[in-house]
């Protein structure tokens, strides 16, 4: 996500590294490079110029504290302005109304139907709502079928009528059914349309007028960069939508849409899509995104993702097993499966401060755990419960059964044992204290 922009900004902000003080000359030189980085990311020229002018003005008005270098100060100002540029604070979707009616809009291929499914799943699992998805794309039967497939996948009801060609009538019938069935939210998926297609734009304007949605969301493919911003402006002029959804942020995203769209249309980004899975939807936090763009990681989001998957009760049970040295391969496999649910492994690693650059050029497959899972699943229940039983002949059998080499099996067993020892030590305060006491002075962490 935003790898090129992150790299270019990092290079630009290094201009001030080691400088004793901020001057108009060195700030101007840095901002020139920052502006180039933003333009290369397909950020609107006026937005890029205003941004760098603001950062320069604020930097020149600051006195550098002895504890803070000029480079650090400029990074702080740049971070704050990036967050402000993207909206400053997160904006929630409106969930009032009985039921709440949410209308999707956007170009064809922007990911509206997939997002409709993701939002329905989010509202059901995280907000406790009972959503109804409505197929109002009367031009593409595949879109209707896709919505039904997604509905079955996430356990959400879908309303459709392939015989009816008027989206207003379909939406009105769906809203009536939602009221009868006590659905709390109605999500209306519409056909993709070009802003220059007057007939299609009139159609969605008529739909808005007829159903009076509580929330209109504009779904845009973030990989289209500045074109996405221009399209958003044209749609906003006709629909006056309430928020923007950026999809496909896990792709080769340059960043122009995310950084420009709020300034151009003055509407907040509310969600971002980061993959094909129904769980791959995140609330948009401008400050956290600024952290990630500047390579600072995003620990808060990482912790929140972890909390969604790991309950306190599970943590207590696991701690008890670790303390009594009963952590086994069933527990190990369970932890792997929970981590997989958190999202793309490379993106998760990128949320750890300092890891973004390290994993940038690494090829980390989403199926990176497949080999490990195959090895564990090739063990007998007794072997999983008692890893100490795994002698040479058992390891050979497991290697053949899992399709992995004996080296991979041995490597996993060593990693498992090392993990178990570390967990036990972390759980044993006296052992930790002893380790810290015996640690060489130069290796002692500083707080």
Image: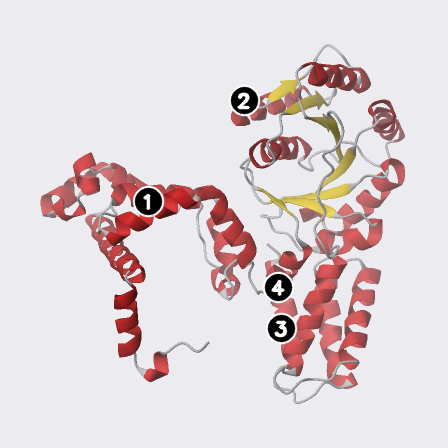
Dot placed on the residue nearer the N-terminal end, 1 or 4:
4
Residue 411 or 197: which is nearer the viewer? 411
Q: CA distance from mark 1 to mark 2?
A: 33 Å
Helix, strand or loop for disc 2: helix
Dot placed on the residue nearer the N-terminal end, 3 or 1:
3
**Pointer 4 residue:** 6
Residue contact at pointers 1 and 2, CB within 8 angstroms? no
Residue at 75% x, 37% y is: 217
**Pointer 2 residue:** 152
Dot placed on the residue nearer the N-terminal end, 3 or 2:
3
Q: Please provide percent x and percent y for residue 292.
A: 60, 60
Residue at 51% x, 66% y is: 354
Q: Please provide percent x and percent y for residue 261.
A: 77, 51
In front of the other: label 1 or label 4? 1
**Res 54 label:** none
Q: CA distance from mark 3 to mark 1?
A: 46 Å
Q: CA distance from mark 3 to mark 4?
A: 9 Å
Q: Please provide percent x and percent y for residue 271.
A: 67, 44
- Is residue 17 something one can see in this rendering? yes
Residue contact at pointers 3 and 4, CB within 8 angstroms? no
Dot placed on the residue nearer the N-terminal end, 3 or 4:
4
Report crowding for label 2: few under 14, some 14 to 19, many 20 or more residues within 10 A (C-alpha): few
Helix, strand or loop for disc 3: helix
State whether residue 30 is above or below residue 397.
below
Dot placed on the residue nearer the N-terminal end, 4 or 2:
4
**Pointer 1 residue:** 317
Q: CA distance from mark 4 to mark 2?
A: 39 Å
Residue contact at pointers 1 and 4, CB within 8 angstroms? no
**Res 11 label:** 3
Report crowding for label 4: few under 14, some 14 to 19, many 20 or more residues within 10 A (C-alpha): many
Helix, strand or loop for disc 1: helix
In front of the other: label 4 or label 2? 2
């Amino acid at each position: 996500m935003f790898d090129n922009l992150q790299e270019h900004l990092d290079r630009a902000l290094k201009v001030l590294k080691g400088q004793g003080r901020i001057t108009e000359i060195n700030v101007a030189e840095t901002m020139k490079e920052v502006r180039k980085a933003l333009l290369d990311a397909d950020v609107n020229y006026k937005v890029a110029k205003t941004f760098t002018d603001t950062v320069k003005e604020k930097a020149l008005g600051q006195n550098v504290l002895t504890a803070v270098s000029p480079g650090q100060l400029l990074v702080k100002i740049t971070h704050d302005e990036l967050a402000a540029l993207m909206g400053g604070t997160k904006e929630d979707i409106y969930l009032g109304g009985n039921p709440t009616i949410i209308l999707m809009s956007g170009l064809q291929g922007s990911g509206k139907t997939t997002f409709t499914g993701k939002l329905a799943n989010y509202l059901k699992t995280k907000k406790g709502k009972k959503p109804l998805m409505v197929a109002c794309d009367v031009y593409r039967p595949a879109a209707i079928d896709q919505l039904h497939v997604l509905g079955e996948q996430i356990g959400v009801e879908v309303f459709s009528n392939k015989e009816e060609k008027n989206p207003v009538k379909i939406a009105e019938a769906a809203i009536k059914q939602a009221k009868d069935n006590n659905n709390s939210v109605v999500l209306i998926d519409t056909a993709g349309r070009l802003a220059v297609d007057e007939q299609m734009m009139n159609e969605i304007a008529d739909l808005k007028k007829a159903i009076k949605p509580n929330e209109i969301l504009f779904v845009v493919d973030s990989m289209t960069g500045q074109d996405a911003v221009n399209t958003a402006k044209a749609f906003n002029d006709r629909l006056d939508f309430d928020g923007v959804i950026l999809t496909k942020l896990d792709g080769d995203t340059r960043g122009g849409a995310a950084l420009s769209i709020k300034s151009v249309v003055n509407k907040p980004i509310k969600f971002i899509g980061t993959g094909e899975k129904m769980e791959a939807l995140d609330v948009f936090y401008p400050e956290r995104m600024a952290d990630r763009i500047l390579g600072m990681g995003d620990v808060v989001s990482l912790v929140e993702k972890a909390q969604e998957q790991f309950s306190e009760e599970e943590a207590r049970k696991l701690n008890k097993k670790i303390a009594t040295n009963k952590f086994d391969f069933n527990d190990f496999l369970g932890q792997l499966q929970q981590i997989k649910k958190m999202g793309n492994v490379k993106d998760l690693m990128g949320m750890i401060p300092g890891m973004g650059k390290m994993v940038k050029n690494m090829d980390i497959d989403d199926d990176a755990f497949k080999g490990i899972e195959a090895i564990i699943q090739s063990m007998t229940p007794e072997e999983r419960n008692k890893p100490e039983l795994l002698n040479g002949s058992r390891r050979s059998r497991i290697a053949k059964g899992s399709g992995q080499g004996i080296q991979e099996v041995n490597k996993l067993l060593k990693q498992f044992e090392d993990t178990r020892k570390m967990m036990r030590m972390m759980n044993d305060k006296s052992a930790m204290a002893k380790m810290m006491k015996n640690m060489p002075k130069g290796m002692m962490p500083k707080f």
